[in-house]
Amino acid sequence: MELKKPYLLFLGDAADALAAKVAQGIKTWRPEYCVGQFRLENCNADCGLSDMTIQEAVAAGAKTLVIGVANRGGIISDEWINILVEALEAGMDLASGLHNKLTDIPALVECAEKNGRSLFDVRYPTQAYPVANGKKRAGKRLLTVGTDCSVGKMYTSLAIEKEMHARGIDADFRATGQTGILISGNGVSADCVVADFISGAIETISPENKPDHWDVIEGQGSLFHASFAGVTTGLIHGSQADALVLCHEPTRQHMRGLPEYALPEIDVCMETNLATARLTNPDVQFVGVSVNTSALDEDAAMSYMARLEEQIGLPVIDPFRQGVGRIVDRLAALS
Amino acid sequence: MELKKPYLLFLGDAADALAAKVAQGIKTWRPEYCVGQFRLENCNADCGLSDMTIQEAVAAGAKTLVIGVANRGGIISDEWINILVEALEAGMDLASGLHNKLTDIPALVECAEKNGRSLFDVRYPTQAYPVANGKKRAGKRLLTVGTDCSVGKMYTSLAIEKEMHARGIDADFRATGQTGILISGNGVSADCVVADFISGAIETISPENKPDHWDVIEGQGSLFHASFAGVTTGLIHGSQADALVLCHEPTRQHMRGLPEYALPEIDVCMETNLATARLTNPDVQFVGVSVNTSALDEDAAMSYMARLEEQIGLPVIDPFRQGVGRIVDRLAALS
């Protein structure tokens, strides 16, 4: 699966900016993929792109309409469907990361077939992945792991890829979740793969490469999350990471969705991730910690990170406040 | 999903006894479920049950024909299909653990619909499982784990259930693979669940129970298997095991299917399983090691197990040679 670029970002009737965060992520990390945005009249989000009609977007070269909004109640409304049909007829593919599938809507399936267009429900794997073989493959790999779910693994991975590119390092972000897939145009939604093939899917999306090439693999879940640690384990093994970056949100009161479960201690979490990762790469090392300090003021954030850096002896940064330069600095020693 | 009992075991044209090992497993562990066996003329296996025609089996009360043979080349032959259609028309459901699905064969689907019968492809989950909630639930649970795949986890689990029943302990084997499901009539094939739901599936098949009831949960894979450890992790977390039994095959040269990967040391493997299991049950303990010594002669087997027992300080047994009584003895201390 590879989405055709460039994109028209569909913001639909987004209730607020947060509802359009997928579109915003694409605009932030891949502005070169975006020709414009499409908004319905009652849309309360704005990605700062030119508003375009379907015809204007096609004229500007758009190849895929990407649904960049979380729809309300999981229903894809008739109003949306009319626009999506217009996009298919005008020559665009459609891509969505929603739980509800485009391919379950007969009007879209028929229209896509008639016009030779494709519907991409990126959350759902369409290819069969092999069982992982665990064989060492050429190229370098960095994987983000987390104390919990939703602590900034995708953001950190994309920030590291961007910093690497700025330094002339050959690197590719490898998406493992639907938003990451829409941003980069390919990848696999690791938590939607059949359990036997988690590691094999990651081996597939991060294949053998040049010795000095870096894959920056988006992590998922946490080894300490009682619902999702199986996904995390398979992802770690399949990635054969040379470098790990721990992502953390310091104000979280308990594991996401699990009120009975406390977050792990940072040092215990790092040691557990290393022990798991060593199975497929005995030389794996942590190169830093990425903290989402958005819930702290500047002073509290900086002193939290200074204390943690003192404790663990590795760069501790907030990619949003300070960038990831100090983490990327450490990769030179591994290369 | 719950298969209707009793069963007619279909041995088909099994090339040898090994090809019919699923049928043999059902006969060994659930003889009370088996009214007879059905063999084609060129069948070279025999489970020691009465040979019956479809009509004789139905007259004897058979409710489900269970395909207890691994078919050649993955093809379900026309010769088989004629018999399966006859079984459906005579009033039986069909159940299969094969990779190829009964529900992909139009003749069977049509015949089942016409006759109000069910086709069970037990390898493939048909229900949606919830995301695990990690909440402590009443009842006791024992889980078999392994140094590798295919080291006797199902056999050990069934032997423990049988020993518990012999002692009047309220216990249920909980199947997590297709053979176990056909033996017990229910369960989930853990490695075929979508990755997000591994732990949730195990929580579902081992629900809250009476405080002194034991679920004996069949493990899958190994935390040290680079292809499948994600499944194992999710299974461990979902089971919330009070007691673990490690299963091991001492002559294995490398991890199954992975020539580059050595087997873990027993003590390292036990500590890693405990660390993983403690996330959802901090009180988890090992109660013994079950060794498949079939590749060793009696003297070598007994001295291997004596040495290992000396090293780890827990009962080390081969369930086939000695039974699992000494492992079940230790559960009293946990109850």
Image: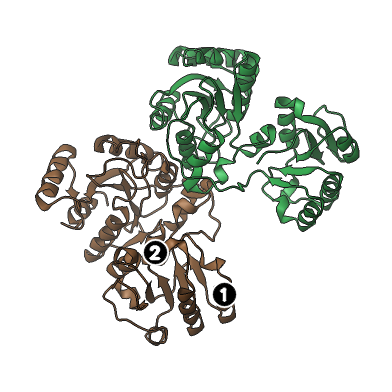
Chain colours: A green, B brown
| Mark 1 vs 2, N-terminal side | 2
B148 left or right, relative to B85: left
A299 left or right, relative to B22: right
State the residue at coordinates (56%, 26%): A216
Up the image or down, B99 lies above or below B255; here it is: below
Up the image or down, A214 lies above or below A326; here it is: below
Up the image or down, B267 lies above or below A79; here it is: above
Name the residue type under label 2: Ala
Nearer to me, A300 or A36: A36
Check residue A174 in the rendering and tell me which mark sits there, or answer none: none
Name the residue type under label 1: Ala
State the residue at coordinates (38%, 75%): B7
**For mark 2, what is the residue?**
B70
Up the image or down, A62 lies above or below A74; here it is: above
B160 left or right, relative to A324: left
**For mark 1, what is the residue?**
B107
Mark 1, chain letter? B
**Element marked by disc 2:** loop
Location of residue A162 by image quarter: top right
Residue B267 position in % (x across, y down): 25, 36
Residue A187 position in % (x across, y down): 61, 37
Residue B173 position in % (x across, y down): 34, 60
Residue B58 position in % (x across, y down): 41, 84
Location of residue B27 by image quarter: bottom left
Residue A261 visible (yes or no): no
